[in-house]
Amino acid sequence: RKEVEQDPGPFNVPEGATVAFNCTYSNSASQSFFWYRQDCRKEPKLLMSVYSSGNEDGRFTAQLNRASQYISLLIRDSKLSDSATYLCVVPLYNFNKFYFGSGTKLNVKP
Amino acid sequence: DAGVIQSPRHEVTEMGQEVTLRCKPISGHNSLFWYRQTMMRGLELLIYFNNNVPIDDSGMPEDRFSAKMPNASFSTLKIQPSEPRDSAVYFCASSRDRGRTGELFFGEGSRLTVL
């Protein structure tokens, strides 16, 4: 089983829609989680961290469900500029390895 | 401030040739990571250095791959001999404190095509 699994999508949504992605992880000892964003043919960049209580940054909300071992990313009022691939990241407890999911592609249409 | 700098940005080579990819991490960062990204396998961690010392190279595909970090401001990833299946985008990333904040700063990548 892979360390991190994501639905590859693509998710095609109209502007203004709310969209959510899930990511499952296999290591129950993992403590920290992150969402990265990668634009087409660009490098990944940190979008937000996911804490046990969840995290909200403007239109973006990340939540953690330890019992089911998944994290989610919710995007409200989606913009054209949100079109990208969203990567779920789970570091091992000692932060030596950052496991990246394969990414979920989002296309926001006008 | 300058970000992570990688070179070359693009390389096209023939099977059997040696390829050397270079990376300059952000000044003050003490951890450096080499990743490879393909459509089929996504982002794979190849090797990780902390304070210039290789900590974990279990992701290096085979002996044809080697990486060095002779000082805090420079690292290389070498493939010798290269094969078509090595075609991918190779990213270098750096972080402070082994990335405890979760933030890895990636370079723009080196896109390698092996014919």
Image (spheres, grey):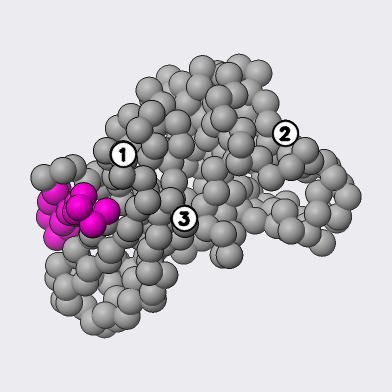
Q: Nearer the viewer, mark 2 or mark 3?
A: 3
Question: Cβ–Cβ below 8 Å for labels 1 and 2?
Answer: no
Kind of residue at disc 3: Lys
| SS state under label 2 | strand
The span from disc 3 to disc 1 (Cα, nearest Å) is 15 Å
Residue at which label 1 appears: A29
Residue B102: x and y in percent read 33, 37
Residue B39: x and y in percent read 57, 65
Q: Residues within 10 Å of mark 2 (few under 14, many from 20)?
A: some
Segment colored magenta: A54-69
Name the one closer to the observer, A2 or B48: A2
Residue at which label 2 appears: B66
Kind of residue at disc 1: Ala
Name the one closer to the observer, A25 or B10: A25
Numbered circle sitting on residue B64: none
The span from disc 1 to disc 2 (Cα, nearest Å) is 31 Å
